[in-house]
Image (tube, rainbow, N blue to C red):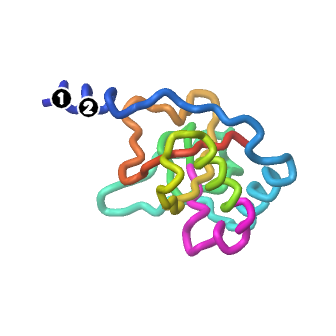
Amino acid sequence: RLAYWSDTYRAEVPSPTVLRGVLSAEEVAACCALASASGRRSEPTTAWRTPPPVCPALADACFDVVYTAEHVALFLHRDGLFADRCKHLLAKVVRAMREGGRVDPATELQVRCVELHSYSEGGALDAPLHRDSGSLLTLSVQL
């Protein structure tokens, strides 16, 4: 069974399309300012999950979830934050996804989530079992 899922996963992973210069320096600064303004710096402990501690290099990062001590993420889509405060950036990101050539131009695209990931040494977005289930496209914009 494990081999089945592993083989399926490999079959679903296309090679990435690299789009350079999607956001300007000012737009990157706007994303970072929005993250700081959110003020969120914790993942709640629940009955089923106790988040790992965050490494010292990420002590000042804003986050909603801790994937590992070296990898945290902030959900900028929560409560419509990014869509309300950064409409022009949202439109620009959707345009970049469409222009990347990975989707039929007639396909309607809607942004499902906007996440700001923060990493320290040892953290990585391309973890072997990471999946964006439910997404037609995933666009990672390196800030």
Nearer to us in this view, 25 or 47: 25
Q: Is residue 102 magenta?
A: no
Nearer to us in this view, 131 or 47: 131
Q: Residue at x 79, y 50 (%)?
A: 28
| Residues at circles 2 and 1 in contact by the CB criterion of under 8 Å | yes
Res. 14 image quadrant: top left
Q: Secondary structure at mark 1?
A: helix
Nearer to us in this view, 64 or 117: 117
Q: Is residue 109 above or below residue 10?
A: below
What's under tag 2, amino acid-wise? Answer: Thr
Picture coordinates of residue 94, whole percent (x, y): 62, 55
- Considering every residue shown, the one lying at the far left of the view is 1
Q: Is residue 9 left or right of residue 123?
A: left
Q: Residue at x 36, y 63 (%)?
A: 46
Marks 2 and 1, Cα distance to the nearest angstrom? 6 Å
Q: Which residue position holds label 2?
A: 8
What's under tag 1, amino acid-wise? Answer: Tyr
**Residue 116 disc label:** none
Q: How many C-alpha atoms fall within 10 Å of the one at disc 1: few (<14), some, or many (≥20)? A: few
Res. 75 image quadrant: bottom right
Picture coordinates of residue 124, whole percent (x, y): 54, 32
Q: Secondary structure at mark 2?
A: helix
Which of the image's four quarters has the C terminus? top right
Res. 77 image quadrant: bottom right
Q: Is residue 91 left or right of residue 138?
A: right
Q: Is residue 141 above or below residue 3?
A: below
The residues colored magenta run 73-89
Magenta stretch, overall SS: helix
Q: How many C-alpha atoms fall within 10 Å of the one at disc 2: few (<14), some, or many (≥20)? A: few
Q: Which residue position holds label 1?
A: 4
Q: Is residue 138 above or below residue 120?
A: below
Which of the image's four quarters has the N terminus? top left
